[in-house]
Image: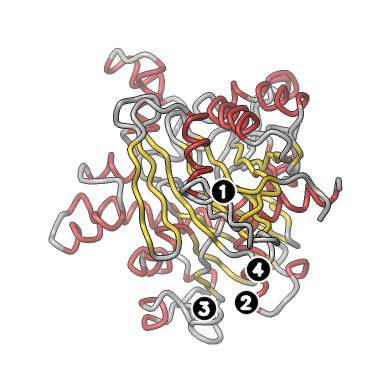
Amino acid sequence: MSVPSTTIASADGAQDPALADPRPAVLIVNCGSSSVKFALIGTRRETLILSGLAERLGSPQARMTWKAGDAKFTKELPDADLVVALHEMIGILPGNVRVVAVGHRVVHGAEAFSHSVRIDADVLAGIERCNDLAPLHNPANLAGIRAAQKVFPGIPQVAVFDTAFHSTLPPRAFLYAVPYDWYTTDGVRRYGFHGTSHRFVAGEAARRLGRPLEALGLITAHLGNGCSAAAVEGGHSVDTTMGISPLEGLVMGTRSGDIDPSLHEYMAARRGWNLARIMQSLNRESGLLGVSGVSNDMRTLVEAATGGSDRAQLAIDVFAYRLAKSVSALSAALSRLDAIVFTGGIGEHSAYVRARTAEHLKVLGVDLDPALNERHGEPLTGRISRPGTRTCLVVPTNEELMIARETLQVVQSQS
């Protein structure tokens, strides 16, 4: 692979001269407003070399935590910014690693970016033009890109967009029934998110089923603190639950998901709240947290419900019912439904939520095997359904690996 690279020194700053052929790797960077998640993935065998998080950046409490193999580490970084954090990251990368590219997660690409792209000045300007659609995310993603360009000069940098996988939605799926010039002039439409996760698990589900992805109709459910589901036909997203922002769709940890839009006017009249206050509540105070009054963490809610908390149980029931309702609706986008795939923290680890959801999907032929569901699926396939019923799988997601693959593909195509 003929691309620029940089060889990273060991933690003590020394370079081992015996390392004549350092391992090529892709560095994955995912920046928030005051944090940066990172992962280093070897390209030869797609191995995770290390992963970590620098958080509370810009404050005296800033620190970096990371994991390499089974070992875990923490380093305090008082008042560090993104550039400092990335420089510190260099110091913890193994000395036998050669970074050949940096892949950046970018939340919103609107219609300007339907696939991953190598970053240049025009791409940066295009991402910035999407800031209005993702004011909490894109500016932070841009800051991470610019910081990485300073720290890794000459290394190819690639933007991988959450929205890109859903760029194949047909107009009947992405358009809202609002004045058409809202779309043509203001970009109002469904964009969808969690695209790297939906794409990864769709491909992995096909591999586990031993069938070509191009021949399958799937519904993938990414369930974590943020939640979305997608209809995937022939490897392409044809509908999804999130909309112009990640607020639409399923019930989530602190987000409401679907509501009647007139609720904004109603709450403004009832409580005297302005739009910003209402949106804060819908994004930060709703979902599982709002209904339960206990937590936005499903593990805590299941424990509380088992202990007799009616509100915790109610939150779980609302979550599972709304998920099942959306899965049923998404089936209308497909010409065939070969499998329902659960992924994400809740989707992969909560047998209870999967079982509660399945109770509302009998019309689709869903019938889970209780033993397989409790074990989170058969070892090789991830199947949790009974033979002869609608196939349901648990497939762990790997967004970092998907970003690494996308990044390498872009770099190799231009080398």
Q: Mark 1 points at which residue?
A: 9
Tell me which label, 4 or 1, sits earlier in the chain. Answer: 1
Judged from the image, the secondary structure of the residue bearing numbered disc 3 is loop
Q: Name the residue under label 3.
A: 383
Tell me which label, 2 or 3, sits earlier in the chain. Answer: 2
Separation (CA) of disc 2 from disc 4: 19 Å
Residue visible at 38% across and 47% down in the picture: 65
Asked if one can make out residue 176 in the rendered structure from this viewpoint, the answer is no
- In the picture, the disc for residue 208 is 2
Separation (CA) of disc 2 from disc 3: 9 Å
- In the picture, the disc for residue 184 is none
Q: Are marks 2 and 4 in contact (CB under 8 Å)?
A: no
Q: Are marks 2 and 1 in contact (CB under 8 Å)?
A: no
Considering the image in quadrants, where does the N terminus appear? bottom right
Q: Name the residue under label 4.
A: 45
2 vs 4, front mark: 4
Separation (CA) of disc 2 from disc 1: 39 Å
2 vs 3, front mark: 2
Residue visible at 64% across and 72% down in the picture: 338
Residue visible at 53% across and 43% down in the picture: 90
Tell me which label, 4 or 3, sits earlier in the chain. Answer: 4
Q: Do the residues labelled 1 and 3 touch (CB within 8 Å)?
A: no
Q: Residue 109: image x %, image y %?
A: 68, 34
Instruction: Report the amino acid beneath label 4.
Output: Arg
Instruction: Report the amino acid beneath label 3.
Output: Arg
Judged from the image, the secondary structure of the residue bearing numbered disc 1 is loop
Outermost residue on the front side: it is 17
